[in-house]
Every structure is written in structure tokens, then in C-alpha cells.
Image (cartoon, grey):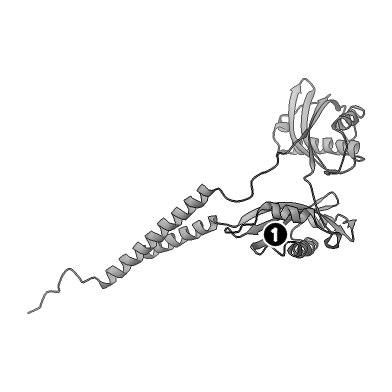
Amino acid sequence: MSSIMTFVMLMLNVCWCLSLIEANQFPFEVLLKENTQDLKWDENYANEKNEKFQNLANKVRSKLGILFRNATDITEIQVKKFREGSVYAEFTVSLTNNTNITQSYFTTALNNTNSSLDIYSSQPPRTIAADIELTSFVWKENYAISSSCDFSTVTKEIKESLFNIYKSVPGLIDLEMLDLKKAGDEKGNVEFKMLLDSASDVKVEDLEQMVKSNKAGKSLTGNMQFGEVSMKEVTIASDTDDGRKPSWVLILVAFSCLAIFALIVYFVYRVIAQSFAQPKFKLANND
């Protein structure tokens, strides 16, 4: 019984090793259109289990398959999610480990898409980091706990008020509340992140001025108002990694697999040797 369990454990280790040697994977994002017109956003696109999500994902995979038809080493094209701002599709392309195809091949192909596929190269959204002072702010201890109802309630009110201020900003995608802190007597600070379409040319200074001109805001509890505001655009460094695993990782995985294979061979040898081995004792004769 112990021999069987040992063999099973060895096989599980082999499967684990094989799972580490996964295909090269490159992430991308594209803008989707329909007959060269921006595709209208549907809330069902946010739910990967929804039929509309699955139908659109299948359509995108089909078009990408046509676009990348010369890349014979592709093992999978997986649509991860759709996001609003027209409609953007985030997807990954997986390749075999021995491929010579690099990420630049796909980037070039996406940059040269034609209107017949209704798929267009997309740049990452602009990210604006913001810190706004809250005045006439009554601090509650539960505000320090992001999972509390008090935190959810007050940050929801702040977000709604900011949305009312920024709703006319071209290319606004989302506002994400990050943190809420006490900053003194009847003062607090809220940190949030603003996502803008990459094509939006609105200036950070203009975004700051919009808050300064609407300090009272709307939907804020009691006399709470917006005070000083600080915003800056976050520059995302370009990723030069081509998506391949470092060579030392592949060497380590290969060595591990070789060691496990040697153990399996040894295990099989011991089982066979024991099955053919002669008994070391003789049965006593009754006479």
C-alpha cells in the first residue's frame, strides 16, 4: 500500500512540474467597433458568465485568429474581460515554449489592423492619482476599516459627488476610492484613482480646478466639503519583458523533472526487483 502511495505522490509531483512549464503568454488590449463605429457598452459585458459576454468573446477570438493566422505556434487566445470606455477587450495570447515569435509580432499586427475586422490597437487608459482634503469632517473609527459599512457609505457619497463634478470630462472611465484618513480636527483626506480614456486630452490642472470650483459638491453628508486637492498623472513604465520565463526558472524546472523521473525509474526498478527476488529462507521439512 505504501508503495502505491509513493508512486501516486511521484506522479503528482510530475504533474506539478509540467504545470510550471506553461506556454509563453502575452497580454493585450484592443478597442472594439462595429461597422467602424464605436461599440455601445452593455453591462452584461462585465459578466463573463453572461451569454452576451461569451458571444462577444467568441467573435473577438475569431477575428484575432484571422489577424494572427500566420503565427502557427499559438496555443490559445483567451478573452479575459471587457471594460467600458466604448468597449475594450483585454486578452492574452499563449504560445508554445519553443516558439521564436515575440510580443512585437502581435503589437505590429494590432497596429496595422484594418477596419474590416473592427479591432483597433488600444493604449492603456490614463491614470490620475488624487488626494482631496475633507473639511467639516466628523471622523469615525470604522472609517479606518475598509470593509466596514461606515467606510462604504462615506466613500460612496464622496464618489457620487466626484462623479457629479467630473461627469462632463471627456473619456472618463471610472473613479476608484483607495483610502480614507483622519487629517486633524474635523479634517480628513481621501485618496482615489481616476481612469481616463487614452485619447482624452484633459489636463490635470483642469481636473484640480473643477474640484476647487465645486468644493461643496453634492451628496455629501452634513457640512462636509472638499478642501485642498492634489492630482498627478501616473506614468506606467513600458514593459520590456517579452513574456518568456527567465532561463534559470526553466533550468530549475527541468532539473526538478529530471530528478523526479529518476526517482520513478528507481521506484519501478525496486518493485520489479522485489517481485523476482528469491526468498531468503526455506520452509522447514516436516520429515
Of the residues shown, which amino acid type is indicated by label 1?
Gln
- The 10 Å Cα crowd at callout 1, few under 14, some 14 to 19, many 20 or more, is some
Spot occupied by residue 175 in the image (x, y as percentages of width and height): 81, 40
Mark 1, residue position = 78
Q: Is residue 174 above or below residue 270?
A: above
Asked which quadrant contains residue 169, the reply is top right
From the viewer's perspective, is 95 left or right of 108? left
Q: Residue drawn at (77%, 20%), measured in percent from left and top?
A: 185
Q: Is residue 131 above or below residue 166?
A: above
| Nearer the observer, 193 or 17 | 17
Q: Residue drawn at (47%, 60%), measured in percent from left and top?
A: 14
Spot occupied by residue 57 in the image (x, y as percentages of width and height): 76, 61
Asked which quadrant contains residue 145, the reply is top right
The quadrant of the picture occupied by the N terminus is bottom left
Spot occupied by residue 77 in the image (x, y as percentages of width and height): 69, 60
Asked which quadrant contains residue 152, the reply is top right
Residue located farthest toward the left when viewing the structure as drawn: 287
| Nearer the observer, 97 or 222 | 97
The quadrant of the picture occupied by the C terminus is bottom left
Spot occupied by residue 195 in the image (x, y as percentages of width and height): 80, 41
Q: Is residue 232 above or below residue 53?
A: above
| Nearer the observer, 61 or 80 | 61
Q: Is residue 1 visible?
A: no
From the viewer's perspective, is 146 left or right of 257? right
